[in-house]
Image: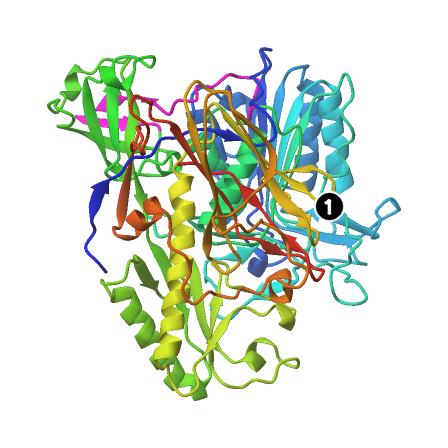
Amino acid sequence: MHDRQRRSGFLLAVLVLIGGLLSPAAGAAGINRALLIGVSDYPGLGPKKSLKGPANDVALLRDYLLGTPGLGFIRENIVVLANGVPAADGLPERQVILSAMDRLADEVKPDDFVYLHFSGHGSRQRVGIDTTEPDQRDEVFLPADTQPPKDGRYPNAVIDDEIGQHIDRIRRAGAFVFVVFDSCQSSSATRSGPGGSADEQERWLPEPVVDTNGSPSPEREQPIGSAEFGATTATSGGMAAFFAAQTVEPTPELQLPTRAPGMKTYGLFTYAIVDVLAKNPGITYRQLAEGVMHFYAVSNRQRPTPLFEGDLDRTVFGTVAQSRIQQWQIRVADDVATVAAGRLQGLERDAVLAVLPDPNAGTETAIGYLRVTQASTLNAELTPIEHAGLPAIDLAALGPGTFARPIEMPIEFESSIAFQPSAAPAFAAANETAKAEITKIVEDKSLPLNLNLVSPGEEGALRLLVASESELYPGTLTGTAPRLWFLGADGRISSDPRLKPHSIGLEGGIPDDRLSQIKSNIAAVFRATSLSRLTEASPLGGGAADVTFSVSGEGQRTLAPFNAPILKPGATIDIAVENLGARPVDVDVLLIGPDYSIRHMMGNRFQSMEKLPPTPIIGVAGQQLRSAAGDRRRARGRPQFAAGGPELPRTGRRAHARRRHTRRARSRRPAREPGERAPDEIRTHLQRPRAAKGLGEVVFLPNLTLR
């Protein structure tokens, strides 16, 4: 491990919105209610079906809803149905769940807000008497009293139509419903490779019946409830629905935050939602969806693919206006200062916060500064420091109205590599050689990388696996020589051998050319994930520039930052920019390719009120961002690593050179004409394209992020 280095850099947080400006918070004084359901234990199915995360999910959500100022929740309006959660209001059994939803429908009034959260196993089963399902399957959520399947169905399962009917009743009363399903309803076209994380588990149980061909049916409907909620009428309340995975994907639970002290097992989807909300108060559901997808990108996870539907331009928990400024009232007890914010709000050890006399004061009026000494999920301890010419403040002198506002937030630039040797005795020499070379790369201080080699089974942004082709694809591929396979953080591989992941042969050792390729591959992953991590530091709220992507060549349509569309051959991605502010704005578009390469596609300065109509993105070499019908490997989504890979822009190269990067609340001054004010800077990137099923089709997932 290298010695940690600390150096300050400067980032200016500016908002980029996709698909419209932020909707104002509703002014009605409704009641905010929540029903949080977490099923960890399934006594009727045996201990092997138990989960660890749902209990932690609902406890985290309850603490976040009650501990965050401005959300408008009180304990008496939050119902927790969970096993393994202290002070829960009941067990998450079928009739208890349905009765709780009935009570909500009876109690809510117009302009109330209802948050429904389901964490636990999901599945699919044969339909009952209902024949409206196109695939003759019901998507189901499995409560704690679920029994072993019988006649193609899970006894006591809560089916999608039942959930939809209850949500319709709540909406007909005039309440807005935000519903989250952190479960999945189907198996996957991918599977875990050997050596996946020991702490990662899928929230899915097998279907009592399967399709006759043994693979996902192309006629499968959307996840549980997405088509069952009914349409919005003039009198019904609105709805936003978030689903952790597509119907042919599993969703995991794992220990989060990765490698942090005191980490716990959470649902990936639940934790990502709370993480984004905690860092970005007052955002819309659309911006929350964007942030969740970016959370996955930073973790180098290409699956699962969540779905987001409904009235996405409403403010999350939108019946109550929230401040967009991250700041918290300071509490002092026993000579220790604390705030009700922690890792979820981005407060890590060594973060610096300004002490302000009141919440409306600017940072230039700071009366002192505090540094974070330790942080948990939702709380942090701080100590006074000398900073910016001010002496360390006396905690005893702080009044009850003083607030702490972040001005320097540490960002970790470290990628973990999980190496999994082969269990085959014949590959012992290949295991030893591969691990020795990877260890040298990790420990090589001359490389512009910050890597950490973790034990097999631990979480890693990159998973390296020693195996043969025939071991991973028995019966279809015949190669028996050892190879080093490059897998994503989830360690999943496609069940289709045509979509096998990238690998490098190990037979005969690792000569210089192979070693160079391994280094290049690891460096490419590190650069791409570091760029995503850098942009993650920018808030999703506020700002004056409107940037949208759209698709041309097949009819103009807007590209959302989620629900990834498919680009047909010949289609191009267009960008439209409108600077609504009084200052110039620099817009740069970066493409993180399927090979983890980084391309600078566009860089322009837009003056105040300047507008760019939808225009094809042109790269520095004059290439349009276009899907290629002839590029079969790319169309199938098989990662092919470039031997070198382009240089990162300046900020990215600086990130490589140190382990710790500090963000300040002002920008680095770009070159400009004499007398011209420094522009706001916006840096966006398109996340890694994803494979479509058909040849010649490439799925792009745009994600506007900022610097």
Picture quadrant where residue 372 is located: top left
Q: Nearer the viewer, residue 366 or 106?
A: 366
Residue stretch rendered in magenta on the structure: 315-340
- 642 relative to 570 in the view: left or right: left
* Residue highlighted by disc 1: 222
Say whether residue 320 is magenta: yes
Kind of residue at disc 1: Gln
Q: Is residue 241 above or below residue 657?
A: above
Q: Is residue 100 above or below residue 94?
A: above
Residue 74, position as x, y percentages in the image: 50, 21
Question: Can residue 136 be seen in this snapshot?
Answer: yes
Say whether residue 138 is magenta: no
Residue 431, position as x, y percentages in the image: 39, 80
Residue 126, position as x, y percentages in the image: 81, 54
Q: Is residue 698 above or below residue 467?
A: above
Question: Can residue 460 be seen in this snapshot?
Answer: no
